[in-house]
Amino acid sequence: MYRLIVVDDEDIIREGLCLGVDWKSMGFEVAADFEDGDSALSWLEENECDVVMTDIMMARTGGLELAQQVRGKYPGVRVLILSGYQEFEYAKTAMRYGVSDYLLKPLRTAELRSVFARLREELDRERRDESMTQRQNREFLAAARTNFFRTLLSGQIRSEKELELHLTLLGLPRGLCDSPLFLCAAERQGEAGEDWIERLTETLPEEAEGCRLFALPDSQERCRLLIAAPPLQGRLDSAAEYRIRPVLDRLEERLGVSLRLSRTLLSTRSLVGSAHEDFESLDAAERINEAASLALMSRYKLFVLRLNNDDQAGIEELLGAYMTELAHFLDPEAHFGYMRFMLKSLIASIAADYGRSGIDTAALTGGAFDGCRLLECADRDDLRETALGMLGKLRQALQQRETSPNYMIKRIEQYIREHLDSDISSEKLARIAHMNPSYFGRYFKKNTGEFINEYILRLRIEKAIELLREGRHKVGSISRMVGFSNPKYFYYQFKKSTGYTTTEYCRYVLAGAEEQEGGEAQ
């Protein structure tokens, strides 16, 4: 349910809007109402809302000033202007302040419902996008922490200052520097679900009070579990290990996994500056050379270079060398899962590199460039062919994108022309173009000379003129057919663009053109 406030200095109108409209059925609730903009702004300082519906003319702080301040302080809040004034200057000013819509009194229920239905769609879309962003941020943070601990265990953290900086950036307490560490081998058993690694760190037993658990996946079946216990005074002894064993027993019982304590370390700080000999004694089923792992992950830069150069042969050669180098550290049969994990990480790194340039590789290839496809592979040969196919499709898509400078613009223009009657947001167009919204706006302006909103408006007015020329539709229907939910706003934009009202255009321009054509025919 979205929150709405009503601002109007006429009591009867304000009360009618608050109590006389079925807001709940439209997904809204009136959180408060005010008789002037000052009171509304004071309330907004301590409360949240999604929509401000305000009269344009009030004794203190009118609607336009309120809209201006809301836009500056609360950019996520929508503003609707109510007015009995029909002068277009008010409408133009309102639009400049980012007003979502401009409604004339007296309000009609159908028009009000239409406006709030559109607002709800926009708010729903933003909420979904925000939820997705939050999930992506959580996933990114989890991946960053995993990479940090892999780097730490390989001895790649060179100083205590660097260690403390990493902890700060990853939102981990500095006290972790002095925490005893326990490295465990974790293996999935038959009862464990698909999400067993995630639940391994989330399901914290009572015995693990004060501990922090971090999973370092090797495959879908195996991972390493790093347990950071509360800092101890003095040396690490058997008593510390004794405290951890009940934690492992309870996790095994709850999740249906096998856990084996491999190594204990005095503290996180003890790993700074060296790979630590303790890890060299781990058996092959529990480790891969961490320095080599990091080096292999950095190979994605070479793949990006070959992809950008449209070098298919080079890509095949590089992938073969990558898998050979990876197999040097792994028993191919015993560690197929880890090999698959490393290739999946490689694909993710390539995608992230292009993502920083505004290119969504999954969308660009129609979903083909997706590391999760590797999870379906059954052996090394299948793994190689699948990865090679994904890289080949990405190369082709990138080449098509680059060799046709107007390819993406034409695609966007075609989409806009086919969807003039619907809501066309720059965010939606950016997704179609496989770019982030801010980059897309600059890209479109650079290649067309027009801002995207100006371009869409021009096409809509041109389409409206075409429909007026046909003479088969009412003006109200035409406004909907070209994407205007509010006919009054359509009339305003039509006159602004052509210099005529729709009636004047039909009477003078279209009629004059027909007379001229008739004269020429004679």
Image (cartoon, rainbow, N blue to C red):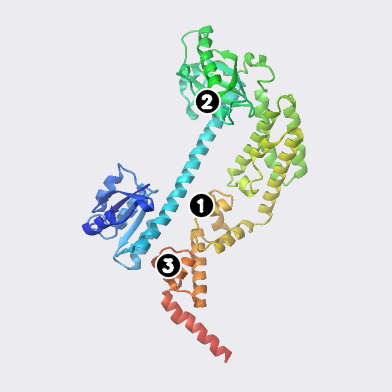
Q: Secondary structure at mark 2?
A: helix
Label 2 neighbourhood size at 10 Å, few (<14), some (14-19), many (20+)?
some
The residue at which mark 2 appears reads as 201
Q: The residue tagged with tag 1: helix, strand or loop?
A: helix
Q: Position of residue 389 (x, y in %)?
A: 73, 43
Tell me the number on the disc at residue 427.
Answer: 1
- Residue 203 picture location, percent across and down: 50, 25
Residue at 45 percent of width and 45 percent of height: 127
Q: Is residue 10 visible?
A: no
On the rendered structure, is 32 left or right of 469? left
The x, y position of residue 367, in whole percent, is 64, 46
Quick check: 313 above or below 330?
Answer: below
Residue type, numbered disc 2: Thr
Percent from the top left, x then y, of residue 403? 69, 55
Q: Residue 490 — which label?
A: 3
- Which quadrant is the C terminus positioned in? bottom right
Q: How many badges with numbers are in the image? A: 3
